[in-house]
Image (cartoon, rainbow, N blue to C red):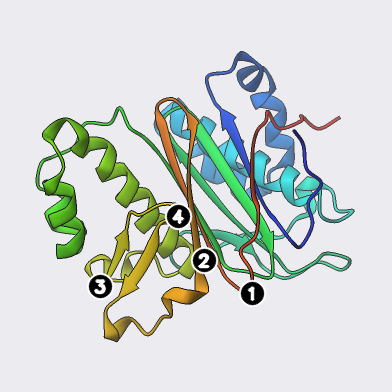
């Protein structure tokens, strides 16, 4: 079901890049991109990386254009110092939009909200993992919980933690400058919660988290800064429209 964007909800669009319609529209998506973005797309060595980048920009730009009467190509997107796309400035007639893009093998996702920090991370759970990755990147509490699960379950629990941690650091806009071991997630129903080491200077009560399975092989997490009540999070599978 399609939802019109408003300030009281989060909208996350998800595109499956293997859909034949995406490949058919891909050459047309370049018309949405700025000159800098076209040049960046050309620097990728792997066609799959190029596709994810171009689809991500098309997804973000067409989603943003649902909030304001601005053509997708006219959104002033820039890359911040941590490699995250953001708006260089708020265009006239546009609300205080915040967005975040994530992509992995087979899926591109973009989340948008108004006036709140947002982070989105999607990962393909087919990815092969090295055994010591949790010890290198998770907090001791997270590692202990992960290793307490049966071996057969640990890969999926890993992606629960990984996507949540990535979504949070992306929402903060600090990238890996934010120490991953200084915050911990608690995987409890109905929604995950977060704990911070004292040196991180953040308030757990100001964060809303949610997780989804946009496909049977992709785990996705969304982090949103709270300002009052939690927002509904609408996840919709779409294929971005090509420019006319």
Name the N-terminal-most of marks 2 and 3. Answer: 2
Label 3–label 4 contact, CB within 8 A: no
Image position, residue 9 (x, y; %): 70, 56
How many angstroms separate mark 3 from mark 1 (CA)?
Answer: 25 Å
Q: Quadrant of the C terminus?
A: top right
Q: Earlier in the sequence, mark 3 or mark 1?
A: 3
Q: In the structure shown, which secondary structural element does the residue marked by tag 3 occupy?
A: helix
Please tell me which residue lies in front, 218 or 96. Answer: 218
List x then y, in percent, for residue 59. Answer: 66, 40
Read off the residue under disc 2: 80
Q: Which residue is mark 4?
A: 191
Gap between marks 4 and 1, in whole Å? 17 Å
Comparing 45 with 103, the one in front is 103
Q: Residue at x 74, y 61 (%)?
A: 8
User: Label 3: which residue?
Assistant: 182
Tell whether label 3 touches label 2 (CB within 8 Å): no
Would you call the spot at circle 4 few (<14 residues within 10 Å), some (14-19), or many (20 or more)?
few
How far apart are labels 3 and 4 at the CA level?
20 Å
Measured as percent of width and height from the top left, residue 47 is found at 46, 26
């Amino acid at each position: 079901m399609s939802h019109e964007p408003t300030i009281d909800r989060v909208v996350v669009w998800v595109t499956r890049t293997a859909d034949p319609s995406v490949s058919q529209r891909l050459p047309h998506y370049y018309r949405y991109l700025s000159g800098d973005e076209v040049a960046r797309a050309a620097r990728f060595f792997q066609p799959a990386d190029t596709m994810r980048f171009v689809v991500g920009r098309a997804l973000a730009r067409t989603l943003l254009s649902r909030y304001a009467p601005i053509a997708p190509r006219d959104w002033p997107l820039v890359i911040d110092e941590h490699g995250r796309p953001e708006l260089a400035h708020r265009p006239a007639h546009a609300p205080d939009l915040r967005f975040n893009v994530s992509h992995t093998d087979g899926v591109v996702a973009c989340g948008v909200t108004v006036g709140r920090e947002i982070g989105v991370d999607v990962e393909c759970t087919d990815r092969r993992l090295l055994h010591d990755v949790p010890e290198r990147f998770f907090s001791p509490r997270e590692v202990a919980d992960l290793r307490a699960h049966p071996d057969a379950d640990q890969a999926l629990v890993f992606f629960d933690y990984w996507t949540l941690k990535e979504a949070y650091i992306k929402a903060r806009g600090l990238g890996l400058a934010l120490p991953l071991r200084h915050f911990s997630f608690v995987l409890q129903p109905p929604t995950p919660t977060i704990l911070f080491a004292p040196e991180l200077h953040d308030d757990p009560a100001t964060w809303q988290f949610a997780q989804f399975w946009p496909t049977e092989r992709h785990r996705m997490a969304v982090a949103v800064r709270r300002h009052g009540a939690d927002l509904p999070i609408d996840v919709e599978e779409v294929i971005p429209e090509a420019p006319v």
